Image: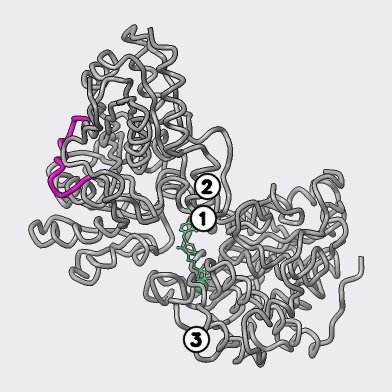
Amino acid sequence: MASSIEYTNGIQPSDKWEMILTRKAYGEMLVELGKKNENIVVLDADLAESTYTKFFRAEFPERFVECGIAEQDMMNTAAGLSTFGLIPFLSSYAIFLTGRAWDQARNTVDYSKMNVKIAAAHGGISVGQDGCSHQSMEDLSNMLSLVNMTVLVPADYWETRKMMEWIPTHEGPLYFRLGREKVPTVTSESTPFKPYHTLEAVGGGDGVFIATGLMLSRAVHAAELLAKEGIFSRVLHVPMLKPMNDEEILQAVKETGAVVTIEEHSIYGGLGSLVARLLLSNDVHVPTRIIGIPDIYLMSGKPEELLVKAGLTAENGAAKMKEALALRK
Amino acid sequence: MPTLNLSVEELREKARAIRHDVLVAIHTAKSGHPGGPLSAADYLTALWMNYLNCDPKNPFWPERDRFVLSNGHCSMLLYTLMSHRGLFSRGYLLTFRTVDSRLQGHPSKTSLPGVEVSSGSLGQGLSVAHGMALGARIRGTPERTVFCNCGDGELQEGNIWEAIMHAGHRKTDNLVVSADWNNAQIDGYVENVKNIAPLPEKFRDFGWRTIEADGHDMDDIVRAWNEAVAGTPSRGKGCGQPTAILFKTVMMHGCPTYENIPGWHGRPPKEDEVMHMLNELNYNYNTVDEARAAMGGFQEYDGYGDEDGK
Ligand SMILES: Cc1ncc(C[n+]2csc(CCOP(=O)(O)OP(=O)(O)O)c2C)c(N)n1
Ligand SMILES: [Mg+2]
């Protein structure tokens, strides 16, 4: 029996978290990668200031393609560039890339299995004051249903940097979700990013939180709250939603006997849906709670206020885990 | 319904007050887009006060004209125009972008009566406006005019050109679009980001009637709107073409120190900046609170409510 919370893989306790932008890590890494690899080209659609592709634009203007406000054009321009052996990274906000340009992503990029890297800023609802039109709670389901698409959701600054190092070595279409706001550094420089694997963030046997992206911080915090009551829940981070590592998830659920998923995405078609399908189709019947954005449009407001409205809090996570544990056989 | 029928002089003064409210509300929210609203303030003030046929007490009045703000980031301008036309009190503008306010970051049809369609994702409004114009025609009421405003950077969206081709093809003459031709967008000057020129020629080649005007000269603005509506079935004789007014404007117009700087597209002014901007508009306050007080201070929503019907 554990007596205190066990952070693993370099995960930091919540009192050590710093707030940093993931999109900034993206911008910095594009420049580093651009120096090492001349095949890297970057596209943007009038949001270079906001997506931080401005760093790359300043360093390599000849490899930067400004598309103006034309996401459909940008998606297929990237597709065309990739046929010359270039590795295009394109950026805008998640809702416009996976909404306006979805058909281009599906019928051109994904269907033809083209080497296009879609880096989407402003994923989730923590976009805040701009309101519903600029929030994205559908991008993951929009992308997860594409056959060849690899889907990544980094938790924070450090993980974004490590994913970025790996991405150019990956061949094929890839979707990469970044946020708008500063997010807590739950991982540290020593935390590994292992493609095709999940990451254990907190050890424990009293149920497992399965989280992705910004919600890893809420899950770790929920585990801390429970630990104060002598409940030691495991936390598993899923940085790669597709292809997802089914075996690792099944094993964690079987070992802990209860599961709470948490994601900054609609309950339709995101992580919770993936895990539920996985468990049921493998006859793993354990108490399960899915925390995501319920079937509502959110609004303008401070990011934290919106997360509370949607129930994406550590407190809610802890409460749901207790519910699930009470039902555990 | 009569419009306010303001004189050119009164329109100028109204546009100044509208710039005031836009800046104070965005500053108060610490979030929002001042650049576009200040470039479109003059010509949209003229439209909203003197041309748009509406009932401020009943935004769902069936015989109204329609206005679609396709460039939804200029929401604060729309809200201010609505307030000054009499839909709700100015003090409510100060709730912009706060949680549960009807004044969403980008206009939301389901939140605020009078918003004809939600916008914020650029490039979609013109198709919707065109559909409304066709709807009026199919209903046998082409005298209802549909007005739509677009940003010039917004004109880079493909959907815009699909709509322009469509309306030209159908000769939808109860549709009037105004373009805020300020040559500025987020990543810089439009001509450098992705050039949209020659604009009047493009519209004309797609079958549109075009009018060019100085978007900051109220006499020229009134001339342009008069000419535009004279070609619609409501106020004159249907000219058999949709109409585009291309208003040459300057981002942040009215605050000379800040004019024509694309960086002001979406940055809220800080306290010293907003005080200076207001000063350049000839409002001399000691504190922003005085400016808020001039708007009536924070007020509850007092416009048409969901409970009133609809
Ligand atoms: C489909 C879509 N892509 C991108 C954006 C982000 N965005 C908001 S405003 C804007 C620039 C608009 O430029 P313009 O129409 O010239 O407006 P102005 O800056 O003059 O107000 C961009 C790229 C958006 N809202 N919608
Ligand atoms: Mg512009």
Q: Which residue is mark 2?
A: A306
Subunit of mark 1? A
Q: Residues within 10 Å of mark 3 (few under 14, many from 20)?
A: some
x and y percentages locating residue B7 in the rendered image? 84, 86
Q: Could you confirm whether marks 1 and 3 are on the same chain?
A: no
**Label of residue B258 in the image:** 3
The reply to whether residue B32 is visible in this rendering is yes
Q: Are marks 1 and 2 in contact (CB under 8 Å)?
A: yes
Subunit of mark 2? A
Identify the image quadrant of the N terminus of chain A.
Answer: top left
Q: Is residue B148 magenta?
A: no
Q: Nearer the viewer, mark 1 or mark 3?
A: 1
The reply to whether residue A79 is visible in this rendering is no
Magenta residues, start to end = A187-199
* Residue found at x 33% / y 20%: A207
Q: Residue furthest right?
A: B1
Amino acid at dot 2:
Leu
Marks 1 and 2 sit apart, C-alpha to C-alpha, by: 6 Å
> In the image shown, does A62 or B261 lie closer to the viewer?
B261
Q: Quadrant of residue A113?
A: top left
Q: Is residue A44 left or right of residue B219?
A: left
Q: Nearer the viewer, mark 2 or mark 3?
A: 2
Q: Which residue is mark 1?
A: A302
Q: Residues within 10 Å of mark 1 (few under 14, many from 20)?
A: some
Q: Is residue B123 left or right of residue A24?
A: right
Amino acid at dot 3:
Tyr
Tag 2 secondary structure: helix
* Residue found at x 87% / y 47%: B308
Amino acid at dot 1:
Lys
> In the image shown, does A256 or B303 lie closer to the viewer?
A256
